[in-house]
Amino acid sequence: MDIPKINIENLNLFIGKQHILKNINVKVPERKITVILGPSGCGKTTLLKTLNRLTDLYPDFKVSGNIFINNANVLKLNGEITQLRQKMGLLSQRPYPLPMSIFNNVAYGLRISGRKKKRILEKRVENYLKQASLWEEVKDRLNDPASCLSIGQQQRLCLARGLAVDPEIILADEPTSALDPLSSQAIEKKFMELKDRYTIVVVTHVLRQAKRIADNIIFMYLGEVIEQGSAKEFFENPQQEITKSYLSGTFN
């Protein structure tokens, strides 16, 4: 196992009396793509939300256990939640650009972190748009509203905005589910390029996508982790009958 960037120990989550995440123990390696895989409703997105404490937004969610990122237990943090979330760029199923220009969507995070000089902003915005493979498509219309972009372009803009806060981790919740095949391919390709610099955690239920991009797999079913480990081992030598059934397409 590679050096873990994220170490989750005995994580449980309840909504009322409903046990959603059940005694989760997983390690996410640094600077790799870890895919959380499993059928719809198995707890993948909920697990992702615990990593940057988005579960705090739901008063009826009760979380216990430990989540260590860089050896700091994020579930025990009090006044540092904003800084925690800045360490994690987040891509949702559908892109949510801010209601402002293309330029200002990326500059927003930069300004929050104190970089406000125009010349520095211009260079940094260009840099992050290039990282998201969007610069060539938008460099002549940076003052246009972000809403004028296609869905695929908006998702790459949201990626650029997330990268602009200098995260260590990129969290992606089914980031290509609303995109056309070409846009999906662009996002997958970008993840493959970015993993040398970032730890990337992707939620998906699409086996083909997991096979294309994953270095590491966490396979979930009904709120439990069934298997975890290298993608090669997972796909070529699954250990559990549930996993074998899921991979063979006979899962029900």
Image (cartoon, rainbow, N blue to C red):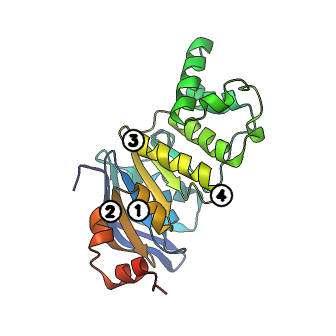
Residue 34 in sight in this render: yes
For the residues labelled 1 and 4, the Cα–Cα distance comes to 19 Å
Report the front residue among 121 and 148: 148
The secondary element bearing badge 2 is classed as helix
Q: Earlier in the sequence, mark 1 or mark 4?
A: 4
Q: Identify residue type, mark 3.
A: Tyr
Q: Earlier in the sequence, mark 2 or mark 1?
A: 1
Q: Which residue is mark 4?
A: 178
Q: Identify residue type, mark 4.
A: Ala
Q: Which residue is mark 3?
A: 198
Residue at position x 72%, y 44% in the image: 150
Q: Earlier in the sequence, mark 4 or mark 3?
A: 4
Question: What number is the disc on residue 231?
Answer: 2
Report the front residue among 225 and 85: 225
The secondary element bearing badge 4 is classed as loop
Q: Which residue is mark 1?
A: 211
For the residues labelled 4 and 3, the Cα–Cα distance comes to 24 Å
Q: Residue furthest front?
A: 182
For the residues labelled 2 and 4, the Cα–Cα distance comes to 25 Å
Say above or below: 125 vs 225.
above
For the residues labelled 2 and 3, the Cα–Cα distance comes to 18 Å
Q: Identify residue type, mark 2.
A: Ala
